[in-house]
Image (spheres, rainbow, N blue to C red):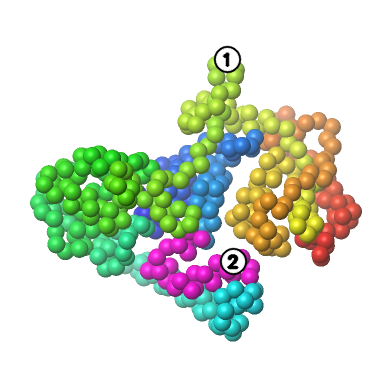
């Protein structure tokens, strides 16, 4: 399954989070660039002592490498989203929490016009839900429904020339590549739909994230036509299957970047991993560790001492404070920043001002930690009895302690109304 097929086959929830689990690969895969994170591996957050499992790191990768999924989806063509340029801008404004009056002040028009746009978007959402239900019901009633080939998201146009079923696609390949999929072409078809189908096949000979010289591109295309490979190379660029430098010095498979434009190379955030060598020393590596190293990393993570307590997030612009509590404060600030960056924090007031003032306006404070008689490790191993059964009462007691501590700090600082986010 290629990257575009994976994207268009994803559920709405998977598209919103920007990644999905591929059982065939046993990995979590980024829907935007195809980066894979093998299930069972432990990834170290760059510049931090915090470790993430594969699923959590996939979410971190999407946010850090590609930014907001909302902004990415809004960058797609109108034929993909069904939204006009004006509607896209309004959706972005609504997501930032701007009021109708603030939008009018920025763009002009009237508040009634903005309210009408809100209404139209709500109606489109209702229609989309019903259409999805209708299509799913239709497909459940009929066997062997023709499946269409996915359209690559960097297509320079999106029209009927891409409306080709899987069977039609196979038929085109058989007709124009009679000697096999490696070529040569019997001819270059004049019909656009067939031409696009063949270009899609040729594009599969290039790998995402790699750059190719013009000579290397020619080497891959000459198998299909030794006298028209230059034409094929031009078509691949014109139809958005490949991108290139202005001087033709390098070619690559394009992807959509943070700002909605095509980027030159795959945007990655590599996991910084720590492999344990035979001499007991830690070694930094940018390669995926083997099973023994991953096991050692996981064991190291689970041996970490668990800090519990109360923390605060202070807005330095207006002095407002958010107070939270956790039984695992290891890397908590990174986690809070990640959630706030996604725009999905449970405290809406804090989320709104985070978008308004930006990350630099906030400070993370550890207000107080819970005192325990012994160190508590990450996996709560210390609260298990000799037979491996969890001492639930002990775990619950720790949770009650941090909640009581939080209440004390709420009473002490009174972060309500203009003083805070509670």
Q: Residue at x 51, y 42 (%)?
A: 269
Q: Is residue 98 left or right of residue 235?
A: right
Q: Give the number of the disc on residue 417.
A: none
Q: Is residue 308 visible?
A: yes
Query: Could you say whether the residue bearing mark 1 is in a helix, strand or loop?
Result: loop
Q: Residue at x 57, y 15 (%)?
A: 279
Query: Could you say whether the residue bearing mark 2 is in a helix, strand or loop?
Result: helix
Q: Residue at x 85, y 48 (%)?
A: 405
Q: Is residue 7 above or below residue 371?
A: below
Q: Is residue 98 above or below residue 387?
A: below
Residue picked out by circle 1? 279
Quarter of the image containing the C terminus?
bottom right
Residue picked out by circle 2? 95
**Residue furthest out toward the front:** 247
Q: Nearer the viewer, residue 363 or 205?
A: 363
Is 82 part of what is drawn in magenta?
yes
**Gap between marks 2 and 1, in whole Å?**
52 Å
Q: Which residues are magenta?
A: 71-98
Q: Residue at x 23, y 58 (%)?
A: 196
**Residue furthest out toward the top:** 279
Which class describes the residues within 10 Å of circle 1: few (<14), some (14-19), or many (20+)? few
Q: Nearer the viewer, residue 360 or 151?
A: 360
Q: Is residue 381 left or right of residue 295?
A: right
Determine the main secondary structure of the stretch shown in magenta: helix
Tell me where residue 90 appears, x and y as whole percent. Answer: 54, 72
């Amino acid at each position: 399954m290629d990257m575009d097929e994976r994207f268009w086959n994803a559920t709405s929830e998977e598209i919103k989070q920007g990644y999905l689990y591929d059982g065939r690969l046993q990995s979590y895969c980024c829907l935007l660039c195809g980066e894979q994170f093998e299930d069972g591996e432990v990834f170290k957050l760059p510049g931090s002592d915090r470790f993430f499992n594969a699923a959590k790191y996939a979410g971190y990768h999407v946010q850090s490498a590609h930014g907001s999924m909302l902004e990415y989806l809004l960058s797609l063509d109108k034929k993909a989203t069904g939204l006009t340029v004006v509607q896209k801008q309004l959706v972005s404004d609504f997501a930032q929490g701007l009021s109708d009056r603030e939008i009018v002040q920025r763009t002009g028009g009237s508040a009634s016009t903005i309210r009408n746009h809100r209404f139209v978007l709500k109606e489109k959402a209702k229609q989309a839900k019903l259409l999805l239900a209708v299509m799913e019901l239709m497909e459940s009633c009929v066997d062997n429904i023709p499946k269409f080939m996915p359209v690559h998201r960097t297509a320079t146009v999106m029209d009927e020339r891409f409306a080709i079923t899987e069977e039609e696609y196979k038929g085109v390949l058989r007709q124009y590549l009679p000697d096999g999929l490696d070529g040569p072409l019997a001819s270059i078809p004049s019909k656009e739909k067939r031409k696009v189908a063949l270009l899609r096949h040729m594009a599969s000979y290039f790998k995402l994230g790699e750059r190719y010289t013009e000579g290397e591109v020619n080497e891959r295309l000459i198998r299909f036509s030794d006298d028209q490979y230059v034409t094929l190379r031009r078509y691949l660029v014109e139809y958005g299957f490949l991108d290139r430098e202005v001087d033709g010095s390098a070619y690559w498979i394009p992807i959509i970047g943070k700002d909605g434009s095509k980027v030159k190379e795959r945007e990655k955030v590599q996991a910084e991993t720590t492999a344990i060598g035979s001499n007991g020393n830690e070694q930094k590596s940018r390669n995926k560790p083997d099973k023994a190293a991953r096991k050692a990393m996981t064991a190291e993570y689970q041996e970490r001492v668990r800090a519990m307590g109360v923390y605060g997030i202070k807005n330095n612009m207006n002095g407002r404070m958010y107070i939270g509590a956790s039984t695992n404060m290891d890397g908590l600030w990174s986690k809070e920043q990640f959630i706030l960056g996604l725009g999905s924090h449970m405290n809406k007031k804090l989320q709104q001002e985070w978008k308004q003032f930006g990350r630099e306006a906030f400070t993370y404070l550890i207000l107080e930690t819970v005192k325990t008689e012994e160190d508590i490790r990450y996996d709560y191993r210390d609260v298990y009895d000799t037979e491996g059964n969890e001492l639930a009462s002990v775990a619950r007691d720790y949770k009650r302690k941090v909640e009581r501590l939080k209440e004390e700090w709420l009473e002490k600082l009174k972060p309500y109304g203009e003083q805070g986010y509670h």
